[in-house]
Image (cartoon, coloured by chain):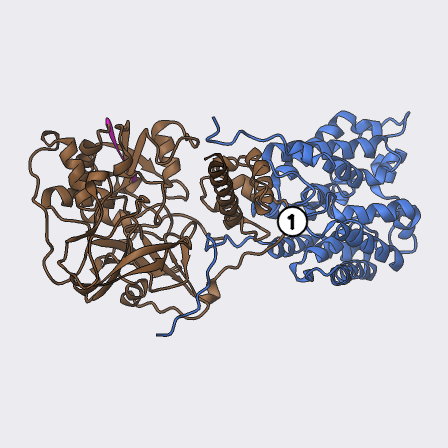
Chain colours: A brown, B blue
Amino acid sequence: MKRLAHKSLSAETKDLAGVDCVVLPLRQTDGAVLTARVKPGQSVARGEPVAGDPASGAARLHSPLSGEVVRLTSIVDQDGGSVLAVEIRGTADAPATTLDPMNGEPDKLSPEALRLRLLEAGVCPLGGNGANARYASLALADTPPDILLVLCTDEEPLVQTQEQVLQEMPEKVIEGATLFQRACGARRLLFAVAEDRKSLVSGETLLVDARYPSALPEILMARATGSYRLDAPRPRPDVLLINAETAAAARQAVRKGMPVLSKLLTVGLDDGQPTLVRAPLGTPLSRVMSQAGLAAQDGDRVFTGGPLRGRAQFDLERPVTKGTDGLFLQKSGKVFRYDDAACIGCGACVKICPMKIPVNMMTRNCEYGRIEEAERYDLASCIECGLCAHVCTAHRPLLQYILFAKKEKQKAEQKAERIEA
Amino acid sequence: MKQNLLTVSAPPFWHSGAGIARGAYLAMAALVPAAAAGVLHYGIGAVAVLCLSVATCMLTEALMQRVLGRPVTIRDGSAALTGLLLGMLLPAGAPWWLVVVGAVSAIVVGKQIYGGLGSHPHNATLIGWIMIRISSALHIDPDVSLLDLSGLTGLSPLAAIRGGYVDQVTLSDVMMGNVVGTIGSASLLVLAGGAVLALLRVIKWEVSIGFLVGGLLGFLLLGSRILPEGVEASISPLVLLFTGPFMLGAFFLATDAPSSPAQPVAMWIYGAGAGFLSVLIQVFGNYYDAGVPFGILLVSLTCPLLDKIRPKALGKE
């Protein structure tokens, strides 16, 4: 059986050169929907903001190319909805327009100024499996959290992005984390780091096991604070979670005035040695794949994020966003097909569930949209790690059932709100 | 530009490799040594019973699924495993019609009428076995059906013990299946195969250990009561544990996935309860040879209740 452990790899980061067209969706990873500040035909410089409003708490989005805005277009986002995007043609060779560097010790800088700078430079949660609310948004942190937790390891097996950032620039991660702490006002700074990388960080650490799901945000936040608080709004008010890449980006934003223009991705076959590629934001996934020597055929599966809770892609012209940590190709022969089968009661899911949920009973109810019954079997405790489906003897798509039930619940709640209003 | 048609699905994109077929074929492989011992000991009749039982189960499953309009899944090995287990519970001299009736009952009444694999509340093998045990007690009794097999003398161990002939039963004989009994009498080989399955986590090992603990406890407390009154002898609980289908029960019958609990604590209680009840029936019951089947079947009725014993989920305030 396949072991689900994180394997460290030492590889060099390759820059993706020659990108001449990018598409920038106008939604940040923290969920903020932006308004375009550019018009078709307008010329933009590399590093010039195209959207975002730091004054109202929305991080900016910058053009990674020097060129011309081709058009505003609507693209399908990863959850099947649509989102407006800016298409830019140009070159990435030009030097970037930067902001003024901010010097001085972190505690001499004003938190407000730091926070504004981070938003101006487009620092919002990087990585973390795409757009989700697991990572904190700086914009939402109105009250200072107790802890700033910096994830210096990757959530899932295969993905190496965060470890690579820590490996390449530990000082920048530490300095960035300190600046971030100053900006958000957190009392404690905690680095979640793998045992063998512990020497790279200084300060308080939280050791992370290589075995999945030890590095999942919900589990780390619970370890840091002593409670899951799954009923509290997300992101959690008491602990702010960012990752190594976000910290490093914060450092570049403050000290160099450098906006976020690119994203580091782990790219590869899902059963091979991955490579690390730094791609301009908005680069089509197909472009990143060809750089890594990958070509998808009919029937293959391409997914962003990790193998346990990533997202399968149907269109390789979709862009790299600030949330894309991994990009993997699974050949059609390796594609595992889940079945519309009955539960045989083997109990494997119950045993492996890190949240001690009676998964067998819960998912039977989820499957048929019986939300109340599913909640009686602790649907609310599920952190969507995907282990239950991974071990299911009957090959039931358990995580799909769970996500379906959560979506149905959300829809029902929204409907109830509308009726009330 | 040509767009590739990619496979799209919800995560996860990896699977551990566990599967119904893997479990069933591993379980059958684990039964091979014990079945081979049965064949060596009882001769060609054992081959006939095992083959007929497996074939009938698979054929019945395919027919039922065809008739009921369900996908035909005999390739997953679960019907074949049911057949093999049923065969192991029968004596080599069982008449063909007995095997066929048992196998058809197991698949039809034990499994398919509930909706197929996963939906049945009982162990299908045991349903089939109990049907023929109750309706045709003589033909299923090794002491009767093996009479015409030359070279086998004496009583089946359980009958001998109940008659007070304790010295006829030795531990090595019951372990290796060197007795008048069912095809799966080589208990030590069953135990070995089962232990491998438990180590591979193919079966619910909690149930197996619980069953053995419950059984051992029962025999320690009540084992001597199995002897007729007035007999001055003692019987080792270990001999009783290796007698009859106790090991088959512990590793292959009680661990049946759909008819056993899914919660770890419930598995222990279920296993120990089934083991203990098997002892009670074997010691005090009229159907003393059916202690294990009845014990497991009755306790598996409580599984939905037992599964309510579960830990509090994390993150619940």
**B313 or B55: nearer the viewer:** B313
Above/below status of B211 relative to A285? above
Residue at the image point whose x is 36% and y is 59% from the top: A328
**Mark 1 falls on what kind of element?**
helix
Residue at 63% x, 44% y is A345
Query: In the rendering, at what x and y percent does residue B27 appear?
Result: 65, 52
Q: Disc 1 designates what residue?
A: B193
Number of on-image labels: 1
Question: Does residue A59 appear to the left or right of A129 in the view shown?
Answer: left
Q: What secondary structure characterizes most of the magenta part?
A: strand
Q: Is residue A202 left or right of residue A215?
A: left
Q: Residue at x 58, y 31 (%)?
A: B310
Magenta stretch encompasses residue A192: yes
Q: Give the range drawn in magenta.
A: A187-193
Q: In this view, does A377 lie to the left or right of A292?
A: right
Outermost residue toward the bottom in this view: B1
Q: Which chain carries label 1?
A: B
Query: Label 1 amino acid?
Result: Gly
Q: Quadrant of the C terminus of chain A?
A: top left
Query: In percent of the image, x 28 and y 29: which residue is there?
Result: A147
**On screen, residue B275 above or below A122:** above
Residue A252 in the image: state x and y as whole percent: 14, 45
Residue A181: image location, x then y, percent: 21, 33
